[in-house]
Image (tube, grey):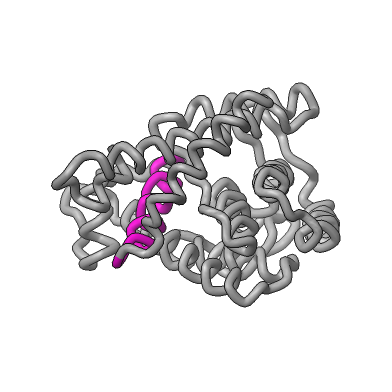
Amino acid sequence: MENRIKIFTKKRDEFRKLKLHEAIDWGKYNLMSISHNSTAIEGSSLTATESQLLLDEGSTPKGKPFEHSQMEKDHYNSFKFIAKEAGQKRKVTPEFIRAISAKLMHGTGKEYNVVAGKFDSSKGEYRKVAVFTGETSYPNFQKVEGMVKTLCDKLGNRIDKVKTTTGIYNLAFDFHFDLVSVHPFADGNGRVSRLMMNYILMYHNQDPAIIHKEDRQDYIDSLTKSREQESTEPMRDFLYSQQIKYFEKQIESQRSSGKDIFLSFMA
């Protein structure tokens, strides 16, 4: 892990020297890329080109489920929302997380009518049902509200105190893990947790984190290992490796001429 962080720091410094943030539309395409990968992890079948045309020009791809296009648009809009809020240093509260979930699930959420009552995932309402993913079970829905508040309070006590780059990334990675482990919503928990991870990073003017769609299984495995070991180290190690991969891609793309700015994120 220590060696991984050294490589991360070296690649990050090399990446930042390129000053890509100053390039026209770089930030927009970076958010598009992260949105594309995040929704692909959750099952979106859109290709990189289809995603670009959808988010940049509003062109819905033919022959693909409309829900997948809606997922990508809602994620992109949610990302723009948190980027704006991060710039204003908005305090992380349960209401803020629910607002993000509502934007994320705007076009694909629905109302549930279950034994415990009604709730609407398109409005960012907490689940009132038990949820499972594979062999993993999550906390009883009656505990969700209190657990999310505890996470927010804990983050509030730390978010302005961390100063080092690795301290900030560790805080963001760990909050992502803690929130997805609560699974407060009926759907979209992974995406909300990754958005919150990036909110914390952008709050500190750090580069947003990306999880590459082709590494989906390794991502899931890292979360599983962290739960089994009761340690965030496996998850942190994986996420640092993803950032190294991202930095290396961007550095290499600058050495190659004529590459499309959006597709360079996907290479």
Q: Is residue 223 visible?
A: no
Q: Is residue 127 left or right of residue 191?
A: right
Can you give x and y, in whole percent of width and height, for residue 14 in the image? 45, 42
Q: Is residue 262 visible?
A: yes
Can you give x and y, in whole percent of width and height, for residue 101 in the image? 58, 62
Vertically, is 119 above or below 225?
A: below
Taking the magenta stretch, the answer to whether it contains residue 258 is: no
- Residue shown at the point (83%, 52%) measured from the top left: 143
- Secondary structure, magenta segment, majority class: helix
Pick whichever, 79 or 146, lies toward us.
79
Tag count: 0
Can you give x and y, in whole percent of width and height, for residue 23 in the image? 32, 63
Quarter of the image where one finds residue 256: top left
Pick whichever, 253 or 214, lies toward us.
253
Vertically, is 28 above or below 44?
A: below
Taking the magenta stretch, the answer to whether it contains residue 39 is: yes
Vertically, is 23 above or below 185?
A: below
- Residue shown at the point (73%, 29%) measured from the top left: 227
Quarter of the image where one finds residue 88: bottom right
- Range shown magenta: 24-41
Pick whichever, 175 or 256, lies toward us.
256
Q: Quarter of the image containing the C terminus?
A: top left
Q: Is residue 140 left or right of residue 65?
A: right
Residue reaching furthest to the bottom: 88
Can you give x and y, in whole percent of width and height, for residue 92 in the image? 72, 66
